[in-house]
Image (spheres, rainbow, N blue to C red):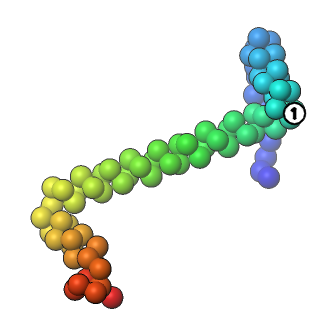
Amino acid sequence: MTDPVSVRLDDDTRRTLATAAKSRGVGLSTYLRDLAADEARRLRKARIRARSRDIAAHIERDPSARAFNADWTKPAAIGGKK
């Protein structure tokens, strides 16, 4: 674990989140940590998908990138890289 993070919540938000945590059988801190970890995973995946779209767009625009990709992704049995 790393350093703790302090978050100020208004009373209504705290009650709402505490109720959700209790319904899952965990404490508020654990629930908030899980929410944060889930969001961090979602953000990382979104960043990877965006980068993949950028690469695909580059391959689509650049003839040499298209040729490299076509050769690189060809199975070795039919003439691709080993």
Where does the image place residue 60, in percent across and percent down from the top left?
Answer: 18, 56
Q: Residue at the location (82% across, 23% down)?
A: 18
Where does the image place residue 44, in percent across and percent down from the top left?
Answer: 53, 48
Q: Residues within 10 Å of mark 1 (few under 14, many from 20)?
A: few
Q: Residue at the location (30% across, 51% down)?
A: 54
- The outermost residue toward the top is 12
- Judge from the rendering whether residue 9 lies leftward or rightward of residue 75; answer left or right: right
Res. 29 in view: no
- Which image quarter holds the C terminus? bottom left
Mark 1 lies on residue: 25
Q: Secondary structure at mark 1?
A: loop
Along the viewing direction, whichever of 22 and 10 lies nearer the viewer: 22
Q: Amino acid at mark 1?
A: Gly
- Judge from the rendering whether residue 34 lies leftward or rightward of residue 52; answer left or right: right
Residue 1 against residue 4 in the figure, above or below: below
Along the viewing direction, whichever of 45 and 79 lies nearer the viewer: 79
Where does the image place residue 28, in percent across and percent down from the top left?
Answer: 83, 30
- Judge from the rendering whether residue 76 lies leftward or rightward of residue 68; answer left or right: right
The image quarter containing residue 58 is bottom left
Residue 57 against residue 39 in the figure, above or below: below
Where does the image place residue 6, in percent across and percent down from the top left?
Answer: 78, 32
Q: Residue at the location (24% across, 69% down)?
A: 69
Residue 47 against residue 21 in the figure, above or below: below
